Amino acid sequence: MTLILAIETSCDETAVAVVEDGRRILSNVVASQVEVHAAYGGIVPEVASRQHLLWAIPVLEQAMAESDVAWNDLSAVAVTHGPGLAGSLLVGVNLAKGLSLAHSLPLLGINHLEGHIYANWLEPDFEPFFPILCLLVSGAHSDLVLMEGHGRYRLVGRTRDDAAGEAFDKAARILGLGYPGGPSIQKSATGGDPRRVPFPRAWLRGNNDFSFSGMKTALLRLYQRLEASGQEVPVNDLAAAFQLAVVEVLVQKTLRATKQFPVAQIVLGGGVAANLLLRETFRERSDLPLYCARPALCTDNAAMIASAAHFRFIEGERASLDLDVYPNLRLG
């Protein structure tokens, strides 16, 4: 049995978890900074770093208390060391190093994107069959990754500009819906007609890459034209049209990639994977088994980092105390 204590501070969530054997969550504490950054309409890196410093120890203490394990019961300490905001990553990595040294525990550095994939391992009904096509969609990433086994990844598609989550944030700002954009767009879209407003899609024919910058610009221009003409701006319809456009591109390009690679199943990961329309559209159109963790595990958390760390730990992987942060770390 392994018991991994994991720390996740890649962006604006301070998270600590204890997970048994990569599958069973004993504790998973997340302190969110959404309200802190809402006033700015987005994440301020320096503010995020300072909040991590304030919350890291209380979150750690709560996670250890909820797990009901002692320090000498733990097998290792794992931490996200990239990608993410440099200052935020440094808080988590240095905390993990201190705990590793103080309690004589092995240290592991984990890729944040790998963690999003392993969030699915925390669902009791998930059984992996390789190779798996992973769609990772968040505020900073929109990647298609072919997972051929534990620790074996091949990047087969990526965004060329804005990530899907970033596009949702910017679209919500244009429409005056607030931050974070993904949930705001989804809520507004439930009262709108996605077909009322014609909306473009960026297909980038001939490859598996994504592009959402043009969609965002199209929304801005349309909003400005409607406002300048004195017409009432149908915010709900625009939100619904934008959401549908993003979802259709994500789904169709992912399903197209399944024809190029002999995959056994599709796995979703990242904050945007919590979007209900995305999940429903995949289930309607995919002939392959589709797996997506519960919404609380799609957003940033430390349990997913602990799950990924378990499989690296049992393979003998260890990091040294000179572990550094890599803000642009990629997967595959």
Image (cartoon, rainbow, N blue to C red):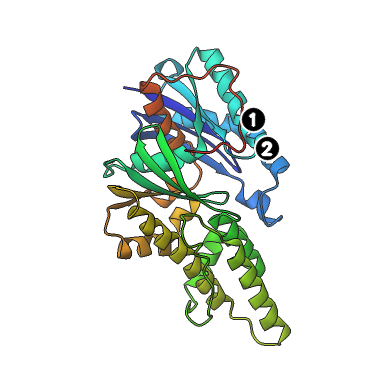
Q: Is residue 152 above or below residue 38?
A: above
What's the distance in space between the residues labelled 1 and 2, CA to CA? 8 Å
Q: Is residue 99 above or below residue 233?
A: above
Where does residue 299 sit, x and y in percent of width and height? 49, 47
Q: Is residue 125 above or below residue 239?
A: above
Report helix, strand or loop for mark 2.
Answer: helix
The kind of residue tagged 2 is Ser
The answer to whether marks 1 and 2 mark residues whose Cβ atoms lie closer than 8 Å is yes
The circle drawn on residue 90 is 1
Residue at the spot 59% in from the left edge and 30% down from the top edge: 92
The kind of residue tagged 1 is Leu
Q: Nearer the viewer, residue 325 or 145?
A: 145
Residue at the spot 54% in from the left edge and 49% down from the top edge: 141
Residue at the spot 62% in from the left edge and 59% down from the top edge: 179
| Residue at which label 2 appears | 49
Where does residue 229 sit, x and y in percent of width and height? 71, 87
Where does residue 248 sit, x and y in percent of width and height? 44, 66
Residue at the spot 43% in from the left edge and 40% down from the top edge: 154
Q: Is residue 257 above or below residue 65?
A: below
Asked if residue 12 shows in the view, the reply is yes
Left/right of residue 232 with respect to residue 293 in the rendered view: right
Q: Nearer the viewer, residue 8 or 229?
A: 229
Which residue is situated farthest in the bottom direction here? 230
Total of numbered circles in the picture?
Answer: 2
Report helix, strand or loop for mark 1.
Answer: helix
